[in-house]
Amino acid sequence: MIHTFELFIPVISEDLQHLFSLYGVKLNNYRYIRAAVKKLNSKMKKVYPAYAIVRTWEHVDGVWYLQMKVDAIKMLNRGTITEEDYVLVECDIRKFLNRHFGDSDYFDFHTLTRIDYKLDAKLLEPRDRELLFKLLEKYTVRFAYKEKIKWGKDETGNPLKYETSQYHKCKSTELIIYDKEEERISNGEEIQPYDIGRLRYELRLKNSHLNSMKREDKGGKGRPKKLKTYFSKKLWKEYMEKHVIPIVHTGDYYKITEAEKKISNSSLSQRKKESLRKFLVMISKGNIDTPLKKSKEEGGISKPTHRQYLRDLANLGINPILIPKNISTENYTSFPSFLGNPFKI
């Protein structure tokens, strides 16, 4: 349910100095505090791998603010973190603060600035994971201001296509879907038992989103920016349904022949069955947005009809993205005609 989160806390100047001195980092030796923080993290992570200092800054009243990132998975050393684990997480943070500042009460004044929700799905076959990422390429380019990012840059600055991950991002939220094993390998990290065969759906709620949810007006929920508030299974489920399902959709993946059988055996009218088949074929030849871009003469449909067809397919348990009849890659020459949708909540 939870992966990582960030929070900032106010600390007095003497305690901040003490934090650096604990790891032998002399602030006077650094021109910029950022360099000192980098050195601090390199030493601190050897002892506390779940913690990192993101940045520090001084407020006008002389109080310092410390922004801290916490990896709940590394903290508890397991892949599944639930609402019931909140007590353990808070206790560990208080121990960390007490060890470094001599006072755990700092946690009482924390402000949550980011939280990453996740769902780990099990897909043990590498071939299935490769197929899924091929299918994901046909998903919508933009949803609720989130834009799909297909390309990045490698270490030398050259274009790099994401083959085992997909990003959908905007200023306030990000969705990243990635192969956990491949991510470990690319980062030069050891694959943990809870990473094997895992596909991760990670929804990142950034500070601007948390700020808007704190508001009492303009669509806000009056939701406090506290860790315990967001450490909620109900809230996790609400976010996953609102931000992830409209992008990845429900229903399993089929080749056209199998999808046609399910549609044919349904109680829908003959006209609707024919329309759904045309809808699937049009998506298969382009992407999920193609029916919206076509003219009426070319078989294009309106947004309300597009949404209705997606609901019809969801009710039948069919994902709108079909498995191509003949698909092969550099690694595999054949793929299954059915793939269960790993995203299930």
Image (spheres, rainbow, N blue to C red):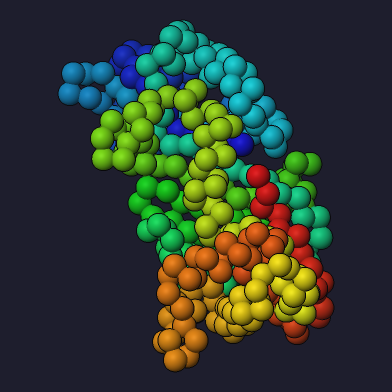
- Residue drawn where x is 82% and y is 72% of the image: 336
Q: Position of residue 8 (x, y in %)?
A: 38, 27
Q: Which of the image's four quarters has the C terminus?
A: top right
Q: In terms of depth relative to the viewer, which is nearer, 162 or 44? A: 162
Q: Position of residue 341 (x, y in %)?
A: 71, 58
Count the numbered circles shown. 0
Q: Is residue 76 left or right of residue 122?
A: left
Q: In terms of depth relative to the viewer, which is nearer, 316 or 136? A: 316
Q: Is residue 253 left or right of residue 31?
A: right
Residue extending farthest bottom: 297
Q: In terms of depth relative to the viewer, which is nearer, 57 or 118? A: 118
Q: Is residue 117 left or right of residue 262?
A: left
- Residue drawn where x is 57% and y is 82% of the image: 282
User: Is residue 329 visible to the viewer in this orientation of the structure?
Assistant: no
User: Is residue 241 visible to the viewer in this orientation of the structure?
Assistant: yes
Q: Which of the image's four quarters has the N terminus?
A: top right
Relative to 287, say whether 110 is above or below.
Answer: above
Residue extending farthest left: 60
Q: Position of residue 269 (x, y in %)?
A: 65, 74
